[in-house]
Amino acid sequence: MGENNIHKEQKSLSYDKSNKPFFPSSSPCSFTAMIVLLIFASYLLYSFSFISFLNPYSPSKIPNSLLVPVIRIGSGLRPEEQQPQTELKHIVFGIAASSDLWKHRREYVKTWWQPRHREMKGAVWLDKPVNDSVSSSSSLPRIKISSDTLSFKYRYRSGHRSAIRITRIVSETVRMLNGTEAERNVRWVVMGDDDTVFFTENLVRVLRKYDHKQFYYIGAPSESHLQNLHQFSYGMAYGGGGFAISYPLAKVLEKMQDRCIERYADLYGSDDRVHACMAEIGVPLTKEVGFHQMDVYGNLLGLLSVHPQAPIVSIHHLDVVDPIFPKTDRVNAVKKLMIPAKLDSASLVQQSVCYDTTRQWTMSVSWGYTVQITRTYMPARMMEMPTRTFNDWHKRHDFTNLAFNTRPITYTDCQRPRVFYLSRAFSNSSSDTTITEYLRHDEWYPKCDWGIADPSDINQIVVHKKPNPDRWNKLVIRFVPSQDSKFAFVNAIEVISAPKDLIADVATSVSRDGTDKFNGLAKQAMEVVYRINVGGRKVTPFNDTLWRTWLPDDDFFKTGDGSSEKTYFTGRIKYRSGGASREVGPDNVYNTARVSKRSRGLVDMSWDFPVTAGYKYLIRMHFCDIASKSLGRLYFNVYINGNLAYQDFDLSYAADNVLASPYYIDFVVDPTADYNNNNNNSPSGSPITVSVGPSNKTSVDEGGVDAILNGVEIMKMSNSMGSLAGYVSAETILSSCPNRRNLSIFIAMLAFMCIFMSFYIVAQRKKARDNYGWTKLSLDVLEDHPKSGNQFIARKA
């Protein structure tokens, strides 16, 4: 982009006072081109209308019922149409429950339902009322009674007709909201069972990825391959694991669901009836692996400790599997897991694999859940595979029945992992970290004669980690055409992770009138024009954390009287909080500089950078005092285009009185305005001049440093039209008249096309005598027409 800039002469355009390009109102060639285009357009219209007349079954004459619908996909929302991102208040929960089991299973709901969150919406749907004052408390969703379903047929022999009641909870939840004030903010309907535990922050993270105005059916299939393959489907979201339906889709489902389930009386469950109706609407399952049906028996250690790289959204079948943590009951185990979930839900049960080379250990950390230590080195691809601590849903001990790969708990006695379960979790506000402690689980371990340290000697492991709420956030780049534009294009997109404060929102504006505060810098589009390593060599992307290229300053340095010198620093650059980081500038920029010294005279060092007129520019100047022998001795002035930008700059004070500590300053300048004020009649090639020089506070010591500069970055800012490519649009360029040679070629091509169309019309006229019309879809054809051959005549509606 702007690393190696070649400045070419540009043809100047005449501008009126409104800064709009001026073009002649008419020209002979444009008039000729318009006449030719009108003739050709008329000829084409006549030709196509004649062909359509010859074909009685042209697409324009097809009944609407036979046309295949075309869906227009928009390029995105305009800024004024954009809405806030999805929050918990935009979700309504429909929880399927049984009156017989509610007294016990309501404790699971209490672990994740947030009564203090007043905007949390939802209802528990029971088959009949329960006499329980606890169920009506604010710690639980409100209780609703499902409507009668006796009129619906249910013919699955070994099933239960409660499946019909549960599948209609989607519709009943929509009807509950119809016409209410709460309905205005609803974007998603989320279904689950009374033994389903949701991690609501992660649920919100997942739903934020999708446009709630479109039709979405989001969930996950079962862990059981047999369940997915035979009884149900891999394309079905299992209701116990939970699934989400966008509210527009839920509204459509509510209108047709009763008629739909009448057609599927032979199905077993509630979720496969929802799936059948989704198939009729034409909405496929969008799979999110964070929803967990948990169609397994036994210990979930093997599954949860290697959770996929996605936020965990739900866990189901808690009454079937063992407690998540040993030596406690199921409900308290869930409550324990919710403690780290509140600290950093995005990282909950996310696996990290590391190696202790001195002890030859492989360590697997499932944050907030377990730490496991295995003797010898285990490859990461093996460590991310679930161990068989559980049994399949059909209790056959056949792990080919599972929908994923598994491995034995251990291959040898010596490799049996030592498991440490979470004991407590808390946050340290002073260091902005979370601290989780894990205690070794007491169980029998066989003897091992390997000469490797035994992890059983360790009783506790402590993990320090910074919270990472943005762990699953994704960058979305959306191209939205403007009202005046007909097209857009992009050649390449390069995305590099950068710190949030890489470009601050505030800078100092510099002009002949002085300095002022410039706001809104973070909202500007920018293009790098120059990135200069002052006093040093070229810095390649391999030596920059953000893969940038920094060029030497020799071609731009204009003070050539020997009054400055290059300096190099071999020590360690001291990055500090509040100053420049390695992402702002790498070591190779800050450990080199140009300096001017008292012994060489009091002069300014200057650099000239040619730029394109008509834009403002961001100038970032990098400083790092690698030349002074002591603090408080270096003062200098900074100038841009001869205007004072910073007077008596004290680099020691700016760097918190630390030598070799980097610092940067951002300036905004309009070189066109500066040169207009200087009565320069040709601003198109106006340069930006950056200078540093001694101030009145400069040290008088012989050999002292008068000024220093380590690096310069210059970035072009978008103009008033939001453009980085001038004021002339592509539409204006394309409308310009071609030269005589191009016009001759254009006319010759038109003549050839006209001759070709004439032959085509004659051929169509001859063919029309024996032709039976336009071919329709196969479901509308006549099977026995005597002259059709490979052609079929469409049946009229």
Image: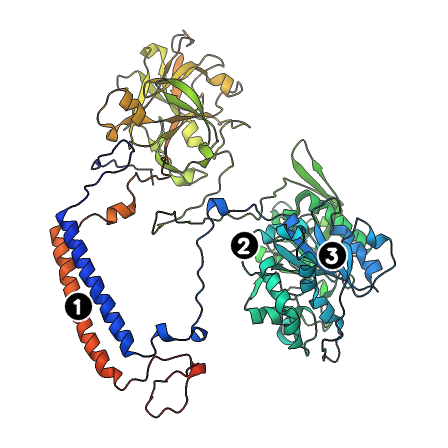
Residue 153, image x and y in percent? Answer: 72, 78
Categorize mark 1 by other alpha carbons within 10 Å: few (<14), some (14-19), many (20+). Answer: some
Residue 680, image x and y in percent? Answer: 23, 23
Q: Which residue is mark 1?
A: 754
Q: Which mark is residue 211?
A: 2
Give the quadrant of the N terminus: top left
Q: Are marks 3 and 1 in contact (CB under 8 Å)?
A: no
- Mark closer to the observer (2, 1): 1
Q: Nearer the viewer, residue 243 or 444?
A: 243
Report, in whole angstroms, how far the alpha carbon at label 3 lies from the one at label 1.
70 Å
Instruction: Name, please, the residue furthest toward the top.
Output: 700
Q: Secondary structure at mark 1?
A: helix
Residue 232, image x and y in percent? Answer: 64, 73
Amino acid at dot 2: Asp
Q: Is residue 402 above or below residue 636?
A: below
Q: Which residue is mark 3?
A: 123
